[in-house]
């Protein structure tokens, strides 16, 4: 058996089991081969591709009038019509043969799924509070917008410290901030923006809650917004106010006292409020004023003087003890309670002071006749 005869026999045996196989005529000396184009192709499941077959002689010229029959290697994957139109039937790869005059040409066809064109994410924006969850959904779509329900979706977050996402698209808020959630399939992706807000404030603690200050003093208060679990909620705007600003005013949490009394300082976060009670007492004695019913006093007559102590805010300092003295007891004497008695004619200065010696003092001049 010649070598060329052996080659023809091998091809005939190889193609004898192919679907739609034809009974190929004997080889013709003028036929060198069959060129199938395209030689390699990928088609989408359930779509078609026309193949072309050219029967050529030894010089490469097309042999006219040659009848071509088509066969497939795996009819479960592709089918081929009498004119060479291939249809994808199942995922996989199969060869398609064009047969004529004892020669064959092959094309390799790979059948793939419909490609994903886009991934649609719903909703595109989500707001959650820390610790809460939100469900996202993602669909892989083909070029016509048809959902490809058999495609796997991979989920990812841009910032796991702010928001996490599980394999089914469930987002959990971790900390205040913004994260981008991505759903991907076959190289395509869709995104959603997740904004995580703090848990709502349910109470505001003001520290200290009660405070006693002298008039003229200042003290900073601290407002602590908290959630239902008692956790501090950061990043909140606090508005301060006083119900008695003449007693104690507040600016940015700093309380400044003016006069004796009681004031309630309120710290507000939205509609949630917390308060502190401020009691203002007089400060140290700044001035002493001595008043008399008259600046004239008869010999052997008496009158009661009054001394008033005030702080630097003009508040009267209550319960102040005064020490009384006369500049000339021979003209007028003064008792420990401020009662003045005229002794003889002349002028005298009566002084009230806050300490036995020194301290803050005030005086009045009395003329005795």
Image: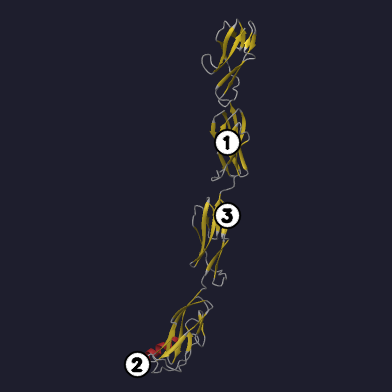
Per the image, the residue denoted by label 2 is 2
Q: CA distance from mark 3 to mark 2?
A: 81 Å
Q: Residues within 10 Å of mark 2 (few under 14, many from 20)?
A: few
Q: CA distance from mark 3 to mark 1?
A: 35 Å
The answer to which of marks 3 and 1 sits earlier in the sequence is 3
Quarter of the picture containing the C terminus is top right
Q: Mark 3 touching mark 1, by CB under 8 A?
A: no
Q: Mark 3 touching mark 2, by CB under 8 A?
A: no
The image position of residue 5, as x and y in percent, is: 37, 92
Report the mark closest to the observer, 3 or 2: 3
Up-down: is 163 above or below 189? above
Residue 127's disc number: 3
Residue 162's disc number: none
Up-down: is 324 above or below 12? above
Q: Determine the secondary structure under disc 3.
A: strand
Report the mark closest to the observer, 1 or 2: 1
Per the image, the residue denoted by label 1 is 250
Q: Determine the secondary structure under disc 1.
A: strand
Q: CA distance from mark 1 to mark 2?
A: 113 Å
Task: Evaluate whether residue 104 shows in this view.
Answer: yes
The answer to which of marks 3 and 2 sits earlier in the sequence is 2
The image position of residue 22, as x and y in percent, is: 48, 90
Report the mark closest to the observer, 3 or 1: 1
The image position of residue 40, as x and y in percent, is: 44, 80
Q: How is the image coloured?
A: secondary structure
Observer-nearest residue: 69 or 208?
208
């Amino acid at each position: 058996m010649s070598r060329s005869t052996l080659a023809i026999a091998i091809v005939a045996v190889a193609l004898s089991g192919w679907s739609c196989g034809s009974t190929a005529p004997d080889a013709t000396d003028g036929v060198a081969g069959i060129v199938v184009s395209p030689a390699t192709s990928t088609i989408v499941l359930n779509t078609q591709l026309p193949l072309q077959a050219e029967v050529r002689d030894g010089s490469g010229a097309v042999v006219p009038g040659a009848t071509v029959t088509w066969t497939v290697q795996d009819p479960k994957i592709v089918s081929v019509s009498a004119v060479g139109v291939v249809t994808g039937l199942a995922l996989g790869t199969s060869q398609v043969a064009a047969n004529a005059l004892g020669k064959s040409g092959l094309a390799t066809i790979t059948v793939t799924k419909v490609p994903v064109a886009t991934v649609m994410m719903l909703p595109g924006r989500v707001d959650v509070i820390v610790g809460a969850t939100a469900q996202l959904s993602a669909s892989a779509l083909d070029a016509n917008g048809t959902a490809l329900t058999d495609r796997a979706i991979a989920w990812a977050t841009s910032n796991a410290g702010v928001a996490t996402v599980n394999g089914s698209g469930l987002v959990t808020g971790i900390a205040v901030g913004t994260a981008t959630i991505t759903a991907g399939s076959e190289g395509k992706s869709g995104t959603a923006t997740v904004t995580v807000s703090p848990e709502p404030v349910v109470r505001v603690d003001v520290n200290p809650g009660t405070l006693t200050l002298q008039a003229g003093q200042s003290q900073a208060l601290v407002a602590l917004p908290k959630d239902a679990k008692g956790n501090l909620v950061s990043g909140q705007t606090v508005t301060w106010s006083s119900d008695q600003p003449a007693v104690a005013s507040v600016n940015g949490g700093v309380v400044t006292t003016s006069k004796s009394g009681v004031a309630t300082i309120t710290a507000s976060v939205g509609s949630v409020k917390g308060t502190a009670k401020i009691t203002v007492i007089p400060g140290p004695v700044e001035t002493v004023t001595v008043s008399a019913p008259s600046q004239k006093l008869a010999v052997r007559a008496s009158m009661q003087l009054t001394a008033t102590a005030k702080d630097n805010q003009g508040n009267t300092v209550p319960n102040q003890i005064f020490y009384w003295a006369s500049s000339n007891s021979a003209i007028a004497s003064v008792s420990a309670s401020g009662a003045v008695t005229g002794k003889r004619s002349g002028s005298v200065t009566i002084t009230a002071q806050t300490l036995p010696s020194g301290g803050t003092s005030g005086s009045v001049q009395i003329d005795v006749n």
